[in-house]
Amino acid sequence: MVRYLIKKFLETLLTLFIVTTAVFFFVRMIPGDPARMIAGEQATLEDVENVRESLGLNKPVPQQYAIYISGLLKGDLGTSLRTKRPVAAELSQRYPNTIKLATLSIAWSATLGILIGVWSARHRTKWQDYLGMTIAVSGISLPNFWIGFMLISLFAVKLHLLPSTGTAGFKSYILPALTLGTNIMAILARFTRSSMIEQLKEDYIRTARSKGLSETPVTWKHAFRNSMISVVTVIGMQFGFLIGGSVVTEQVFAFNGIGSLLVTSVSFRDYPAIQSLILIFSLHFIVINLIVDILYAVLNPEIQLS
Amino acid sequence: MSTKNEKVKSSRFQEFLKKFRKQKSAIAALIVLLILVFIAIFCYQIAPYGINEFDYSSVLQKPSAAHWFGTDEFGRDLFSRILCGTRISLTVGLAAVTVGAISGTVLGLIAGYYGGIAESLIMRMCDVLFAFPGIILAIAIIAILGSGMTNVVIAVAVFSMPTFCRLVRSTVLATKESVYVQAERSLGASDARILFRHILPAALPNIIVQYTMSIGNSIMTASSLSFLGMGAQAPTPEWGLILSTGRTYMVNAVHMMLFPGLAIFITVLCFNLLGDGLRDALDPKLSE
């Protein structure tokens, strides 16, 4: 177990290192002269030189890399070309909003997804199953931005019940969270169903039933508890994807988070900001995956043996 | 020998057809997809109006007999534009996933079959690509290459490649040591023969299912990128772009967002249903 965890931890460190390096080469991969690209076509030579200097592109690459890494370790994410302020300052303002949104989304979508999955598995090939799986397959096929706009036009424009934009108060989180969670809810419903069906085929379920146990405790106490191990893993992984998905949702709701910041930065060619944001998004994902791996190891007794 | 092989193959295919025929929703999805392909090919002939036919006397009109899906801010017929958008979305989805599937499969075969440094390198690369959640990798690629549909295809291809790579590698690892592959090898078969006659066919069912599902996913990602302003540019009748333009007129012209969204939904849904059906028909574990 300890060995497994150490191995996972080292693997994560390696991936972290590779990702940080890949992101470092990000700006340097722009075809042609990055400084010229960033400064724009109408820029004067002086502007181009300024950009080059502000990005440190005039120094030799190994030195640039050393500056970049030592900056990262100190929490320096560079200066935004758009706002002329440190990227870290803007990030720290918006970051909590995105995390709140993601947490709310995963909370409702995991609860509902698991319920639908268990319900479908329990009533396999009956109407409940078909209904549940129709909801699920529709849920994975709906474009996020479309759900968002349909919710806005219904709840904000027509009914005036909920705000369509902003981050002020719980009410303004409801529509974005519904939008962001729909796909995940559907994925979890499908996954829970198939994992429950597998568990319900097992011998211990047959034993439990033959003891005369009724379906409800068989479903929840036996099958559900065992399928939770893999369901929890998937929830964790989806949480990582959810943070990525926030890019589109935040844009729909003009939500003040790091996803909409990424879109703005791309349209302004604000490379230092894009670079740091991409790094933040993937760091999240990597750390969440590590936590998932650890959780899986703790929950799953089989891993301890191997 | 070869006729026997053919027989085994054809009976396996017949078994698949028998199982697939029972997947009613997958068959319905396949029919809808064939209709969509037909629309994509003949959209300019079918469309009642030109996609860039401006008509300032009928701007932002609600759906009517003359304009089934209404008109947009320039009075262009939305139904015609959405019909022609089918070609764009299907082309982007197919092109991106085909490139991703082929490169992923080749890399997966190499990694799984040869192992060693090649495997470590390829799988590390996949890990890195997987370390960017969802659409972020595509956005990063577009930030480097610039916006536009060709770059969207490249971005989505890179984004779908590692899934195929991992999938193929794990099948290779599972079949490499099987008795029939070892028998072939002891008979002196070349690597290429083993890879393409034995290992690849074993991986094919998984690849086909993943391919189908990925197309739906890619169409969704591509239209999301256009929605974010990183893909198709005006006046292209791309679904995500039409929807994005529509948000300015949300209060009095919801149809500008409703119909392109429905088009994406139906297309992606059909690919997912078809993928589900194929998986159930191809999965040996599910045979009852």
Image (cartoon, coloured by chain):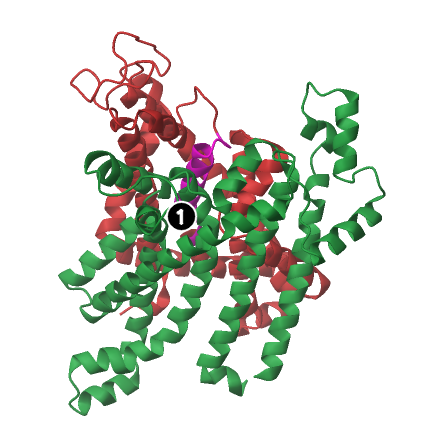
Chain colours: A green, B red
Instruction: Label the magenta part by its dominant secondary structure.
Output: helix
Looking at the picture, how far across and down is residue A281, in whole percent? Answer: 55, 52
Quadrant assignment for the C terminus of chain A: bottom right
* Left or right, A222 with reference to A280: left
Q: Residue furthest bottom?
A: A211
- Going by the numbered disc 1, the residue's amino acid type is Thr
Q: Residue furthest front?
A: A168
Looking at the picture, how far across and down is residue B144, in whole percent? Answer: 63, 36
Q: Which one is in front, A3 or B40?
A: A3
Residue that appears at 71% across and 48% down: A24
Circle 1 is placed at which residue position? B212
* Left or right, A51 with reference to A81: right
Disc 1: host chain: B
Looking at the picture, how far across and down is residue B263, in whole percent? Answer: 30, 34
Residue B261 makes an appearance in the image:
yes
Residue range of the region highlighted in magenta in the rendering: B210-231
* Left or right, A67 with reference to A188: right
Residue that appears at 29% across and 85% down: A203
Q: Which one is in front, A15 or B273?
A: A15
Task: Indicate yes or no whether the magenta region holds residue A173.
Answer: no
Looking at the picture, how far across and down is residue A33, in whole percent? Answer: 75, 30
Quadrant assignment for the N terminus of chain A: bottom right
